[in-house]
Image (cartoon, helix red, strand yellow):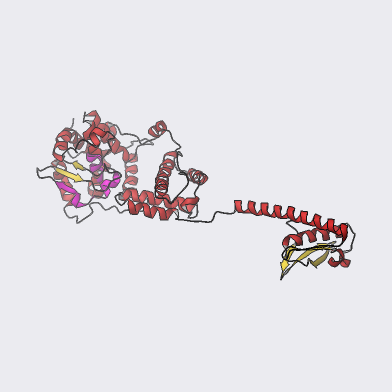
């Protein structure tokens, strides 16, 4: 009944259809939609049963009772008309229930009206209150949250559901993102949602909660590989490396620093001249001030061997940034180095699907372990958090002088592997 061709024109509804191939149009003489539907049904019933021909139909001929709900008028002539009026009222009740249910269903499938802050607005507030975050973290959060927001067409944070996160995971998988990458992006969203909930911008449960795809074991197994000592020699004591020293000194010194400091690629490529320091006691060190974690903000001892081997000459005419690599949105400043390092591995025939630039950092940590460097010193050198209350709360950091003394022997061995010291071992 709801699909009858009944239209409001002016102050009255009309029935406008075709009967036996001929156009049929009649006023239903009411402004009440429900009554109009009842009369339209009655008209079609009479015409289709051939009780009345379309051209002879006159609504007044069949209007023996009167209903005007807008004015509260109910009239009937005699018992028969009274019963017809009651039947009409029951029909009105039934139809109105149907209309109400229909409108309720329409409301349930209608897109939710946005209210409150959008996800990107929440992210702005997140950065406002967490101004200590590193540039790399700021970039990572911006890239992932913007991608997710664009995928959902800029939603309000209060309207985001678990299913939205599921659709985003499937979208990433279809774009050939690895499971590890998908988990990392969902972790970013989970942090932003937690912030939104804590600050009162979101009243629902975190839609990214417990959405990790990888188990701890799988995550460990799918991580980057670690170079062997023989492979490090192939990389650093190669013609490709020697040629880079003159043809591409930026790349050469990034690789040397990676092996001697264990720094992340972004920490190295973003170095400024001011970060190369010397302590009051004469210890050379690099001050990392912008890192992935709080523990990453650290002082890393470097030996005078590095300084006199050509590094001092390389940075002599630098005014601010040491390396030529520019920051690229979503890719950091080490993207170009990573690409060239891949070609470098191919050139020296070091193969491995999980061997990347970050594998150098893993190698350094493993090398220090093999050389019996204590856990606390190793974590401080690498910029790793130590989740131990005795160390984290009740002890100070190792001084740069003591850290250099602990690591001196290991750094010397790494310098030989890097090729800046001629002695072999």
Decide if residue 169 is on the left or right side of residue 105. left
Farthest residue, direction bottom: 10
Q: Is residue 225 magenta?
A: no
Query: In this image, 368 relative to 65: left or right?
Result: left
Q: Position of residue 416 (x, y in %)?
A: 19, 36
Which residue lies at the image location 87% right of the left edge and 60% below the top edge?
78
Residue 423 shows in the view:
no
Q: In which quadrant is the N terminus drawn?
A: bottom right
The residue shown at (67%, 54%) is 100
Is 181 placed above or below 373 here? Answer: below
x and y percentages locating residue 343 in the rendered image = 34, 43
Task: Give above or below for 380 relative to 331.
Answer: above
Quarter of the image containing the C terminus?
top left
Image spot of residue 273 (x, y percent)? 19, 52
Residue nearest the observer in this picture, 90 or 262: 90
Task: Give the farthest residue toward the left.
Answer: 281
Which image quarter: residue 34?
A: bottom right
Quarter of image, res 219: top left
Q: Is residue 115 visible?
A: yes
**Residue 200 place in picture, x, y as percent:** 42, 50
**Closest to the observer, 233 or 148:** 148
Q: Relative to 30, is 305 above or below?
A: above
The quadrant where residue 356 appears? top left
Q: Which residues are magenta?
A: 254-278
Report the magenta stretch's main SS: helix
Q: Is residue 143 above or below residue 358?
A: below
Is 266 covered by the magenta stretch?
A: yes
Q: Is residue 245 left or right of residue 96?
A: left
């Amino acid at each position: 009944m709801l699909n009858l061709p009944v239209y409001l024109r002016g102050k009255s509804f009309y029935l406008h259809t075709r009967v036996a191939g001929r156009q049929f149009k009649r006023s239903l003489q009411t402004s009440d939609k429900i009554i109009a539907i009842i009369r339209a049904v009655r008209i079609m019933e009479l015409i289709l049963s051939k009780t009345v021909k379309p051209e002879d139909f006159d609504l007044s001929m069949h209007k023996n009772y009167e209903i005007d709900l807008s004015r509260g008028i109910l009239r009937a002539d005699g018992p028969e008309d009274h019963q017809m009026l009651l039947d009409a009222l029951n029909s009105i009740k039934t139809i109105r229930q149907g209309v109400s249910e229909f409108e309720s269903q329409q409301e349930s499938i209608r897109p939710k009206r946005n209210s409150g802050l959008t996800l990107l607005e929440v992210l702005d507030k997140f950065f406002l209150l967490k101004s200590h975050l590193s540039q790399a973290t700021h970039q990572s959060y911006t890239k992932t949250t913007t991608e997710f927001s664009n995928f959902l067409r800029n939603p309000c944070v209060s309207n985001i559901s678990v299913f939205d996160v599921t659709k985003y995971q499937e979208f990433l998988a279809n774009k050939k993102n690895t499971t590890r990458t998908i988990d990392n992006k969902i972790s970013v969203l989970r942090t932003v949602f937690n912030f939104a909930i804590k600050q009162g911008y979101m009243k629902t449960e975190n839609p990214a909660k417990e959405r990790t795809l990888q188990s701890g074991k799988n995550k460990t197994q799918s991580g980057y590989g670690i170079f062997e000592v023989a492979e490090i020699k192939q990389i650093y004591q190669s013609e490709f490396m020697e040629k880079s020293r003159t043809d591409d000194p930026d790349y050469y010194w990034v690789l040397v620093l990676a092996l001697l400091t264990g720094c992340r690629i972004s920490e190295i490529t973003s170095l400024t001249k001011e970060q190369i320091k010397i302590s009051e006691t004469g210890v050379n060190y690099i001050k990392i001030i912008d890192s992935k974690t709080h523990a990453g903000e650290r002082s890393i001892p470097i030996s005078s061997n590095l300084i006199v081997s050509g590094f001092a000459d390389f940075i002599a005419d630098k005014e601010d940034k040491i390396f030529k690599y520019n920051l690229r949105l979503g890719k950091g400043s080490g993207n170009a180095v990573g690409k060239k390092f891949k070609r470098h591995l191919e050139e020296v025939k070091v193969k491995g699907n999980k061997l990347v630039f970050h594998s150098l950092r893993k190698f350094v940590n493993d090398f220090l372990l093999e050389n019996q460097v204590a856990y606390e010193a190793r974590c401080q050198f690498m910029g790793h958090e130590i989740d131990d209350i005795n160390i984290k709360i009740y002890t100070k950091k190792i001084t740069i002088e003591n850290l250099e003394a602990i690591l001196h022997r290991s750094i010397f061995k790494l310098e030989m592997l890097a090729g800046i010291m001629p002695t072999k071992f």
